Every structure is written in C-alpha cells, then in structure tokens.
Amino acid sequence: MRLLLWALPALLSFFTALPALANEASARAPESGLLGWAALGLFALAYGFVLLEEKIHLRKSKPVTVAAGLIWILVMTAFAHEGRSEEGAALLRHTLTEFAELMLFLLAAMTYVNTMEERGLFNALRAKLVSQGLSYRALFWACGGIAFCLSPIADNLTTALVLGAVATAVGGDNKKFITASFINIVVAANAGGAFSPFGDITTLMVWQKGVVPFQDFFALFIPALISWLIPAWALSLSVAKTTPPALEEKARIKKGGYAIAALFMLTITTTVVLHQTLHVPPFLGMITGLGFLKIYGFFIRRYELRGRPDLSPADQQKPFDIFVNLSRIEWDTMMFFYGVMLCVGGLGAMGYLGGLSQALYGSMSETAAHTAIGAISAVIDNIPVMFAVLNMGHEHSTGQWLLVTLTTGIGGSLLSIGSAAGVALMGQARGLYTFGSHLKWSWVIAIGYLSGIGAHLLINQRMF
C-alpha cells in the first residue's frame, strides 16, 4: 500500500500526459477526447480487479473481457464520429487475428501437456526424483535445473507445479527448504522460458510477430542461465546438506505416454521447419500436430475399451478421451489473453500505444526502456506489456527485441505475483511460500536480472 501511494502521483501525471502524447504520436487515431479517457479508465479499473483476484476471488478473465468489449465500443464510436467506421472495424479484425493465432497455438500445446500429464509422465518424473535419496541441497539444484530445462518446452506454470510437488513431498516440515526451493523453481522456470519461442507466451508472441528469427532466441541461453544461477547459488546456501528420509513412490506411465511425448517433439520440430522454410504461421503446424494426437488417441481409446487385463480398474472404467484433456485447458487464462489483447489493441487504435512509445523511447535509451519494461512486468502481467511493445510500431534491432524478450521473461521473477508460476506455487504451499518470503530474496533476484541483461549486452553485441 505504501508503494502504491508513492507511485500514485507519478501514475496520475503519466496518464494525464498520455492523451496529448497519443495525439502527437498517431495521425491515424481518431480524436478521442472523453471517449479516450473513458477507455483508459476502463482498462485501469479492469486491471485493478485482476490484481485483486486473490483477495476477491473474481477470475481475472471476467473484468478484462467486459472491458475489451466496452473499450472497442468506444473506439468504434470515435471512428464512426469521423466517418471512418470501416477503418476501425479493420483494426478490430487485425487485433482479433493476432489473438486467434496465439489461441490456436496454445490450444494445441496445452492439450499435449495435459495429455502427457494424464498418461503419467510428470508423475513418473516426480516419483523418480523423490526416490533417489538426494540431500536437500542436491534436490534443490535438481528441481531448479529440471525447471530450467523443462520450461522451454512445456509452459512455466506446468513446470512449476510438477517440481513444486516434488519439493513439497520431500521437504515435509522443512519450511526453509520448501521456501527456497519454490523461489528457485519460479526463477528457473521463468529464465528457462526466456530463450525459447515455446517457453513463454511473450517469446511466442515475439516469434509469431516475425521480429526475431527462431534460431536467434537461443542467443539468450547464457544470459537466462546467469539470471537463474546467481539467485540459485545464494538461495542454496540457506538449504541444509542433510538427507531427508527416503520416500518410496512408484508411478506408472500409461499406454502411449512416451509416443505422445515423441509426437509433441515432432509437432514442434515440424512447426519450426514449416515456419522457417515456407513461412507458414506457427499455429497451423501445431493444430495439425493436434490432429495427429487425436488420431493416435483414437487407437489408445480402442485399446482401453477392450478391457485389457494389464489395465487398472480405473483405466478400464475411464478409457482415454482426448476431448477430456482438451476441456482441461485453462480457459480462464485463455480468455484473459483475449481480454488483455483486445483492451491493449483498442487503446492502440486510439493512439495511446504511439503515445506510450514516445514517452518511453523519447525520454530514455532503448536499453534503459527495455530494462524498465522488464521490471514493470513484475507488477503488471507480461502479456499486456509485451503486446503493447509489439504494437507500438517502434523499430528495434534484433538485439533490442531479444533484450525486451529477456527482461519481460525474467522480470516476472522479481515478485511472487509477477508470473503464473509464482502465483500457482503460492496457492500450492499456502503459508510457506508467500509474497513476503519471496520479497526477502528479491535483491539477489534483481542482481541476477541485471547480470543477465549485462551478459546479453556483452555476448550478443553483433545483434545491436
């Protein structure tokens, strides 16, 4: 609350100047006047509800979905007043197309992840780790390392939940271990997702926009690794070297589990190759791969419907159904993306993104602006932040695009509320991993954040 009161005057002065900057920055935007103020107010109000989700238990998709519709009504009113309704409708369709491509890509990726979870692959990973008899510190490093390597393929939320379950199972009553491990997992998952187009929504948006080639993302590997290793090393010093009591846990991978994982990797590879060689939009390769998963799922279902004796009674009663895994997609998150992207697109149509671009890049260097944008993403979700940056119309070098990709990816680790991984783990370990316990280590996470940025500026100079 003290931070909010301190920042309020700056925010008010910024929003007061934004309409004037918007009018200067975009000649195509309609004269919005009160309509523009109303649109800004609606977005601020909706995002206020999003930030209060944990307190009021109102799903984050609900306020932004309503705000998106109302903002575009205001946008279309402003365009209609100037006799430019068709231009406004074209901008709306363009924004919707960007969301549709992202949604279809995520639809396929999330269904694959849900199917691998249902087949028991993630449970098998957890069982393998908890039964190894590792020391607390070795397990700390194992969870962080796996999170860093797994999140470039799976999303950071799934990665965090799987490895958070490992830390909870082994940690027991060891609060210090669980807290340190959860912070480590969040930082590692966010860092690992920053150097892969598939690792985070923001990197996927940058790749789909076409501003960074697929292979160039891997130039962020060492900066991302540094941004995780520095806080991980500091956190590891608080973890004991003693060994917890051995746990015996077995997990069975159901029929087709390994084949589905291989099919997922083949789908990703095909998507990348098609995009690189034929410039096919990534969503098409992923949806085609989803079709192959459905066909393979048909044969798994037929196998399980026969009531084979090697199946458990539960599997015989509930045979595989791909549409069950499809229905388990986080639709609240998906609709949140819709609402946010439509809201930001509406503000952009009124010229506010041009004004924001002028405010950011006109008052500081690109590097300083992108560093600040990453810090902002620790408070405001990185999805609207990145979508705004991509639609400001500002030209950047590949190095600068990679920089803002890195900062929005790892910047969310500065606070526990800055990423989906952090929010999910706060719910998984209530009272153990909290906003306050994460905040105590934010100083070293910030050192890792700045060190990762410095490493990128040094190692990838040729890209700037």
Image: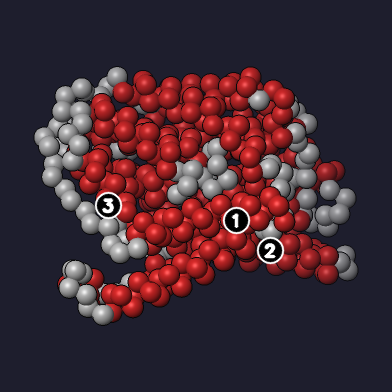
Q: Label 1 sits on what residue type?
A: Thr
Q: Earlier in the sequence, mark 2 or mark 1?
A: 2
Considering every residue shown, the one lying at the far left of the view is 245
Q: Earlier in the sequence, mark 2 or mark 3?
A: 2
State how far apart marks 2 and 3 are (Cα).
Answer: 37 Å
Q: Residues within 10 Å of mark 3 (few under 14, many from 20)?
A: many
Q: Can residue 246 be seen in the rendering of this structure?
A: yes
As drawn, 66 above or below 43:
below
Identified at 39% across, 30% down, the residue is 439
Q: Label 3 sits on what residue type?
A: Asn
Residue indicated by mark 1: 271
Q: Earlier in the sequence, mark 3 or mark 1?
A: 3
Q: Residues within 10 Å of mark 1 (few under 14, many from 20)?
A: many
Q: Secondary structure at mark 1?
A: helix
Task: Count the marks.
Answer: 3
Identified at 49% across, 24% down, the residue is 226
Q: Can residue 113 be seen in the rendering of this structure?
A: no
Quadrant position of the N terminus in the picture: top left
As drawn, 396 above or below 89:
above
Structure colour scheme: secondary structure
Q: Secondary structure at mark 2?
A: helix
Position of residue 335 measured from the top left corner of the image (x, y, whole percent): 53, 63
Residue indicated by mark 3: 123
Position of residue 363 measured from the top left corner of the image (x, y, whole percent): 75, 28
Q: Are marks 2 and 3 in contact (CB under 8 Å)?
A: no
State how far apart marks 3 and 1 are (Cα).
Answer: 28 Å
Q: Label 2 sits on what residue type?
A: Thr
Residue indicated by mark 2: 97
